[in-house]
Image: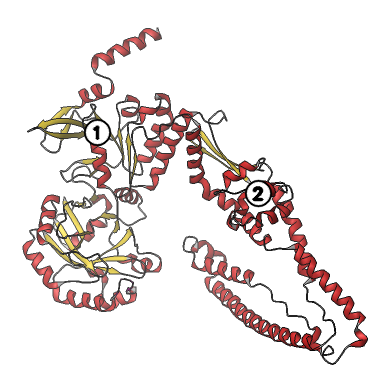
Amino acid sequence: MKKIDLHIHTVSTISDSDFIFSIDILKEYIEKSKLDVIAITNHNIFDLSQFKIIQSEIPVVTFPGIEIDLPTGHLLLISDGKDLDAFNDKCKNVSDRIQSNTASISVEELKSIFGNLSDYLLIPHYEKSPKVRNDDFIKLKDFFSAGEVDNIKKFVRTMKDEEKLCPVLFSDERMKEGLEKFPLRQTYIDCGEITLNAIKSTFKDRTKVFLSENDGNELFQVFNNGQHLSTGLNVILGKRSSGKTYTLNQLEDSFSRVKYVRQFDLVQKDDETDVKSFKSEVQRKRGLFVDKYLESFRTMIDDISQIDLINDEKKLSSYLESLLKSADEVDRKDAFSKVKLFEEEEFTISSSTGLEKLIDSVIYIIDNEEYKSTIETHIEIDKLKSLATDLIKKLWVKKEKDRNKYYINSLVNDIKDNLKFRTSSTAIESVDIFDTLLNKQRVKKFNTITKAMQKDGIIFDEPIQGFRVVAKKLPFKYVGEIKESIPGQLSFKDAFTKYNNPFEYLQLLKDNDKLDSSYYYKAFVRIQYMILNKDGNEVSGGERSEFRLLQEIKDAQNYDLLLLDEPESSFDNKFLNSDVNSLIKSISKEMPVVIVTHNNTVGLSIKPDYILYTEKTYVDNKTIYKLFSGYPTDHELVCCNDGTTVKNYDILLNSLEAGYEAYEYRGGIYNDVKN
């Protein structure tokens, strides 16, 4: 079994923060990590002289490589090192083309520079940002031997999917002066001789790629002392103040994305403040869904708020008055009022929004990669591109016509103004009668839709482990309810008198200078969030804590590691066994989970994959925390620091049952009660 790290940086480039390379740090990293193989892969550069120094002083196999910026992501390209001068020349070609941190080379350029890519080991950023994707990935996939991921969770998930590239985990570390905490991201391969071709061949067989030396992908290293955790469910046991929380804190420091649910974090007092805080938290987490639901309603209000029916009536009245007066003066027209442009109407300019949205939709279909095969079974991409081209041409023509209309309208209005100035005849006022009538219909429809929106209704009803999160829409009954929905010290007393007439209500909201227009929609419909228990009633104080725990655990799916510190402190055993255990067990199949517990419901009923036991000792008046670990079926748990052991049986009984005598005593009581 060989331990490898094929992604190490030794040169500070425009793609890095500044650092000073230290070969002593590199040596220390290799020694402490017990590496067998490394590769030097700097951003878009290969330093030949530095590499030769490293190769001469490092006692392990060292391959030359380069990390190349492609348009979509980063690619590791590693050579066998047999012709360093030739490799150096090719890498210089890359460096010459990439002179900024936004530059890149195309796949075609890559092939022209390096020739036959099969001569190299190619590893793209796979489940790691910035990842190689789309056309870049398709063009190079036949040359990929493995795909780099950035954490244990992604490694395990990708390893289970036979359709994906074999995952590898590397440090991607800068070997710089002052580096004290070494990364634990390395990969083991079952490989005999250490050659580039042998490594490539090993990657092709994912059954020979592992996270740990002896336990395959069941365990992975978490501390530099060699301590391992299961990639699944881990339980930490130990006496009070023996180092359990200390261990969790160390784990939190060792990972970049950790969900840590601390002891007593979820306990809330059953008072008004806690209820408000709880509901605010629920609203925050589900607010995006509700905002999406109200998005069309909000857009409608934004549009309707631009309508001024009073002004429309004034314009229409002015038009009729000027029309009648002009008719009365028809026999008294002078030379200026007889000019045709005197009563000329403006060109109507329609909106381009519909056409622009249509173009965007067609382009979205063309660019869609996820459902590309389905799209192509119904319509050829070339035909879609042709459609997009025709629509864009129509938009160009329309824009040109609109520009001409704007220009002509401007000229006509200037001429009309000059003619009006010189004549005593009455000019007919301009009015868009169709738009005026349309505005009335818009307002009528707005009132109808708004009243429908204000009726009681369920927006969503989401079941979560025996609870239900419900969001309802309903009308406001009191002014105070509106103030709860909109931030700031605002008064809605006068406006609320017209709440049952939506358009008039909107006009009064517009008169409130302190109210931002972006909040208008919140003043029409009240959104109520409720958490219901299995009986359909709103949750109690204890049930709120239970719901929050389930939410925190579920939210952990967005992280790389879940830490739980004594969840039993706040909950009963039935809830833990029926709801919490099943959810934790499910999540542990996707990511590492670590639980500290004294409770046998959590400790054993959950069926952990790995047991850890903490013990506090004193050496020279200094507190030392020892950590023992092993599988649940192991006879003994072993300390990785000094090899000392403790009996697993004793640890389980003492930690979870308060010892054998207490365990037997409780068993006797249960038996007596049963009989």
Numbered label attached to residue 8: none
Amino acid under disc 2: Phe
Amino acid under disc 1: Lys
Q: Is residue 56 left or right of residue 204?
A: left
Residue 447 on image: x %, y %? 73, 53
Residue interval drawn in magenta: 100-104
Q: Secondary structure at mark 2?
A: loop
Rendered residue at 21%/50% (across/down): 184
Residue 124 on image: x %, y %? 30, 63
* Comes first in the chain, label 1 or label 2: 1
Quarter of image, res 592: top left
Q: Secondary structure at mark 1?
A: helix
Check the image and tell me how it is coloured: secondary structure
Task: Name the residue carrying label 2.
Answer: 524
Rendered residue at 23%/22% (across/down): 654
Residue at mark 1 to residue at mark 2: CA–CA distance: 52 Å
Task: Name the residue carrying label 1.
Answer: 244
Residue 126 on image: x %, y %? 33, 59
Pointer 2 local density, CA inside 10 Å: few below 14, some 14–19, many at least 20: many
Q: Is 167 a magenta residue?
A: no
Residue 641 visible in the displayed image: yes
Verify CB contact (< 8 Å) between mark 1 and mark 2. Answer: no
Closest to the observer, 293 or 637:
293
Q: Is residue 438 left or right of residue 660?
A: right
